[in-house]
Image (cartoon, helix red, strand yellow):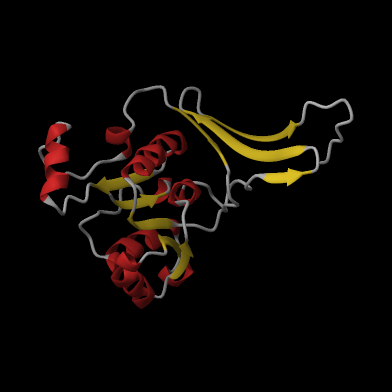
Amino acid sequence: MEKLVVGPSAKDAVSLDASVADNLGAIAECLGRKVQDLVVVVLDRSRHERLIADIRETGARIQLIGDGDLSAGISTAVRGSGVHAVIGTGGAPEGVLAAAAMRCLNGEILARLVVDTPEKEERCRAMGVTDMRRVYRSADLASGTQILFAATGVTDGTLMKGVRFFGDGARTSSVVMQTRPRRIRFIDTLHLRQDSNVKIQF
C-alpha cells in the first residue's frame, strides 16, 4: 500500500494525489509550524529514494526506520512524539492495523493498494476489489463503531520499548486503545519464570 499517516490536526488537509511539498506544507500550516520543523518517518527501502529526495527538498527532517511503520504511524497522532507524518509504501496488513489505531486516536491514514502486476490485480479481483486506484481512509480499513487496538513492543519505538530480558524473566511495554469509551492505556508487564527462587527486577 501507498500510505500517508497524519495526526488529528492535519487529517482533512492531505491527499495521496498531492505532491510531497503540498502535503508537508498543509501539515505544517495545520500544526502552526514551518515545514523545516516537521519530522517525516519513511521506511529505509530503495523504492523510497525519490520520496526521500522530495522530502529533503522541502527542508523537512527525515527519520529513516528499518521496520515498524505501524508504531511510527501511531506516533503521528500523539502530541509530543516528535513525529508529524509517515509517508511511503508498506505492507497492507500493517495499514489496516494503523487504521484501527487512527480510529482510536482521531488521526488518519490514507492508503491505496499497489497493483503493479497482473497477478496482484487478479488477486484483488478475487477479493472483490474492482477499483485499483481507490484511496482508503481509516474508516474504510477499520470499519465499525467499537474499535479495540492492542500492541506490544518487540523492538524499541517512539511509544513503546522493546522486550527487555533479565535473569528471571522479561519485561514488555504494551498499549491498548479503544473508541468507546475513548481510552488509551499503557501497560508495563513483568513476565516471570515459574520458580520459587525467582527475583523481580524493576
Q: Is 158 on the left-hand or right-hand side of 111?
A: right
Residue 41's spot in the image, x, y percent? 44, 60
Residue 191's spot in the image, x, y percent? 72, 32
Q: Nearer the viewer, residue 32 or 5?
A: 5
Q: Is residue 132 in view from this perspective?
A: no
Q: Is residue 176 in view from this perspective?
A: yes
Q: Is 14 on the left-hand or right-hand side of 135?
A: right
Quarter of the image where the C terminus is located: top right
Residue 113's spot in the image, x, y percent? 22, 47
Q: What residue is shown at x 87% (from left), y 35% (from top)? A: 199
Q: Nearer the viewer, residue 107 or 158?
A: 158
Residue 142, above or below 37: above
Q: What residue is shown at x 34% (from left), y 68% (from top)? A: 46
Residue 18: name its quadrant.
bottom left
Q: Is 66 on the left-hand or right-hand side of 20?
A: right
Residue 124: name its quadrant.
top left
Q: Nearer the viewer, residue 174 or 23?
A: 174
Residue 121's spot in the image, x, y percent? 13, 44
Q: How many marks?
A: 0
